[in-house]
Image: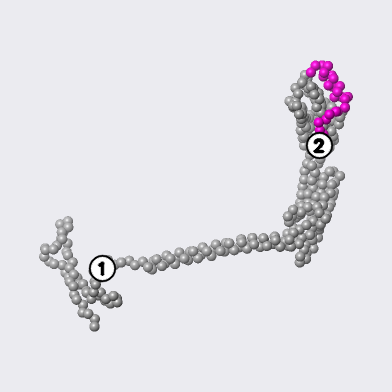
Amino acid sequence: MGPISLLYALFLSWFSPIQGSSAVTPVFVQKGKDVLLNVKTDDGLQEDVFVSWTYNAHNVIVRSSSQKEPKIYLNYTGRIEFSVKNYSLTLKNLQEADDGVYTVRMIGDIEVTAQYIVRVQDPVSPVNLTVDSVSNSSDSCNLTVACRTQDSLISSTFRCDTKSCSEEGGERSEVMTSGASLHVYLVNDSIICNHSNQVSWTEDIEMIEHFCPLSAVTAEQHNNTVYALGVVPILTVIIAAAFYRHRQKSRSKNIENTVYADPKVTAATQMDQSPTNDTSGASPMSTYCLVGHHTGSTGSTKSGGNTQPESLYAKVEKPARS
């Protein structure tokens, strides 16, 4: 951009009215915070361009061109940051006096303007919700509550029956001169008092069940839950005890049914099995008697050079029972 074009751009920025503004954008900022104002164009940013930011139309904040360093005017030194890459403006540590309209104008191959209406707000004060009165009957409960801030108050009444709760007259709200709003409303079984503006909010909550009996459905669900939490552990203990007793009985039964055989008795019993035995369980007809081993060498068994005696059994007939 040459000197003549630059002078012409300065003349337009100072004296010509703003025409063809792309948009007026509201911006809310909490007091003491910073805010970034961007430059947005449909055709992208131009390189050879003159840019100016102004406050309330004629108070120049900064000017910049492709041939010179940006100039920040005295009142805004240390209070702003200007980007030479995208021409955005950052306002720092905003106060109530910074409320107003901020305008950017870019003059080059095409002219682009944009405006921001900046509103600086304090954070809202804390809020307090109190239950002023409670009226209970067999089938309903009424609560009157008050939602207070340091400079405002709204009241509302809630009615609950055995099925649900509702706010008489609908939700209550009030908009204060500061732009903040006070709002009382119901969510499930909770009464909420909310104090908010565009940059902050606070709230206080009261549970209806602390002042009114639970609704029939809620009470039934609550009782079922308590019943389940109480019965399940008891059933678990009973089942475990029964299982333990069953195992103990089975173990005792196995021990009683276990008989350890005597080798001598087993041998005698096996030899006593004879077709002549009485099936009625009477004593056997044959008895075996142990007789001393033969003294001769005949019939002896040798093992490892030692003579092993033989055991001989003589059969003695037992007289039959009459």
| Dot 2: element | strand
> Which span of residues is magenta-colored?
1-26
Residue at the farthest bottom position: 322
Q: Nearer the viewer, residue 95 or 56?
A: 56
Query: Residue 106: image x %, image y %?
Result: 80, 25
Tell me the residue that label 2 is attached to: 26
Residue 63 relative to residue 287: left or right:
right
Query: Residue 244: image x %, image y %?
Result: 48, 64
> Residue 7 in magenta?
yes
Residue at the farthest top position: 3
* Category of crowding for the residue at label 2, using alpha-carbon neighbours closer than 10 angstroms: few (below 14), some (14–19), many (at least 20): few
Separation of marks 2 and 1 at Cα, in angstroms: 112 Å
Tell me the residue that label 1 is attached to: 270
Indicate the quadrant where residue 23 lies.
top right
Query: How many numbered marks appear?
Result: 2
Query: Residue 153: image x %, image y %?
Result: 84, 52
Identity, as a three-letter code, of the amino acid under mark 1: Gln
Q: Is residue 58 above or below residue 305?
A: above
